[in-house]
Image: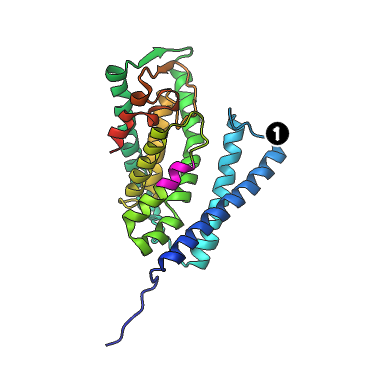
Amino acid sequence: PVTVAPVHPAPSPLKAVGWTILFLVLGFVLTLAVGAGGFAIAGAAPDPANPTTRDLVVQTVAGLAGFGVVTWMLGVRVLRLTAADLRWAPLATAGRGFGLGIVLGALPAVVALGLSVPLGHAQFLRDAGGPLVYLRQVGLTALILAPAALVEELMFRGVGQVVLARAFGRLPAILLLSVLFALAHIFNPNPTALGLVNIALAGVFLGLAFYAPGGIWTAWGAHLGWNATLAALDAPVSGFPLKIPWIDYEPGGPVWLTGGSFGPEGGLLASATLV
């Protein structure tokens, strides 16, 4: 009998790690280069401690350009990965996967914040502004968060996930990249050890969403659903406060339960809902 070699043979573990490191390094380098050019054109340097909307837009565009180009150059052209390999579901089913992801991400965020009221004495207070101003700001915030979430999905649920999964299996690849996903947030404002653990848990959650129907669209939707829901309820997102009019969230305490100034991701309530 004739033995047919697989189209994409599994790389050795060493090669898989090497390709993943190369993908991340090239992506970050290209992102930094594009970002530097963007800030030079804007005529102002970013403020890491208090990023403006302009800073977030420039950084997001740079990330999409950097990791988008490297995904195509390294993933598609060099490693010969197809859209199916990278779990880019067809556009006909992309919307369904994205919508599923939004629900999957929004539900645990709502539960974590909801539980913080009776268990952590958190409060939702009235703030300046009205419903229309609130909806406008939530929409603008979601528009900023959406491409930023896609950038992180390209980084940590893209080429590296596929290559590592072929060498080590899906779950080990998810766990490894989830640790890197957490470490990428170590310089966020007010990070805590529990906050980084929860971000790693979120990475596992998003890795599972990546292998759900809808592929990367589902993972992107889940990422955005979590972040946008927290922002819409005036809670910090991974340490970044995104002020929303008409509603004011006071996290209460203790910090280890509610997350404090890092947002729900810094507390055990988020741990429970993510698990």
Vertical position of residue 50 compared to residue 90: above or below: above
Vertical position of residue 258 compared to residue 152: above or below: above
Q: Which residue is pictured at 52% across the width and 66% down the height?
A: 77
Dominant SS type (magenta): helix
Queried whether the magenta region covers residue 181, the answer comes back as yes
x and y, in percent, of residue 122 in the image: 35, 17
For residue 13, what is the image quadrant?
bottom left
For residue 270, what is the image quadrant?
top left
x and y, in percent, of residue 93 in the image: 35, 51
- In-front residue for pair 103/110: 110
Image colouring? rainbow
Few, some or many residues within 10 Å of mark 1 (<14, 14–19, 20+): few
Q: Is residue 209 visible?
A: yes
Q: Which residue is mark 1?
A: 44
x and y, in percent, of residue 210 in the image: 36, 50
The reply, left or right, for residue 23 in relation to residue 2 is right
- In-front residue for pair 253/71: 253
Q: Which residue is pictured at 49% across the width and 30% down the height?
A: 141
Q: Which residue is pictured at 46% across the width and 66% down the height?
A: 15
Mark 1 residue element: loop
Q: Which residue is pictured at 70% across the width and 36% down the height?
A: 42
The reply, left or right, for residue 59 in relation to residue 204 is right
Q: Tally the numbered discs.
A: 1
The part of the chain drawn in magenta is 179-184
x and y, in percent, of residue 28 in the image: 57, 50
Q: Image quadrant for the C terminus?
A: top left
The reply, left or right, for residue 269 in relation to residue 137 is left
